[in-house]
Amino acid sequence: MKLQQNQVWKKGKEYLRIVRLERFEVAYKSMADLETKEGEHHVLSKKEFCRLLHGATLTETSPDKIADED
């Protein structure tokens, strides 16, 4: 699976949205609820982010529905 900006992943009860994707770094937002869009921003290396996604599922949410750039 190739990482792309604005992808939303679900891991447990948490949603992770990729905000900025660079060569070696991923900025993402962790949210408990997609409707409120409230959450914390985090930055990890790509390798650490891929480890974080282990066991997560890619959601079918359309990017325009959540594409606000926080």
Image (spheres, rainbow, N blue to C red):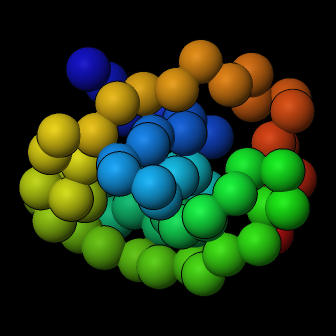
Q: Is residue 6 above or below residue 19?
A: above
Q: On the rendered image, what quadrant is the N terminus found in? A: top left
Q: Residue at x 60, y 64 (%)?
A: 32
Q: Residue at x 14, y 45 (%)?
A: 54
Nearer-the-camera pick, 62 or 12:
12
Residue 46 at least partly seen = no
Quadrant assignment, res 64: top right
Left or right: 64 as drawn, with respect to 34: right
Q: How many marks can you see?
A: 0
Left or right: 29 as drawn, with respect to 70: left
Nearer-the-camera pick, 63 or 59:
59
Left or right: 23 as drawn, with respect to 22: left
Residue 28 location (% of width, % of height): 51, 64
Residue 34 location (% of width, % of height): 73, 50
Quadrant assignment, res 10: top left
Residue 66 location (% of width, % of height): 81, 42
Q: Residue at x 24, y 69 (%)?
A: 45
Left or right: 48 as drawn, with respect to 34: left
Q: Is residue 31 above or below residue 53?
A: below
Q: On the rendered image, what quadrant is the C terminus found in? A: bottom right
Q: Residue at x 66, y 75 (%)?
A: 39
Q: Is residue 32 above or below residue 21?
A: below
Quadrant assignment, res 22: bottom left
Residue 52 at least partly seen = yes
Q: Is residue 56 above or below residue 24?
A: above
Outermost residue toward the front in this view: 13
Residue 35 location (% of width, % of height): 84, 50
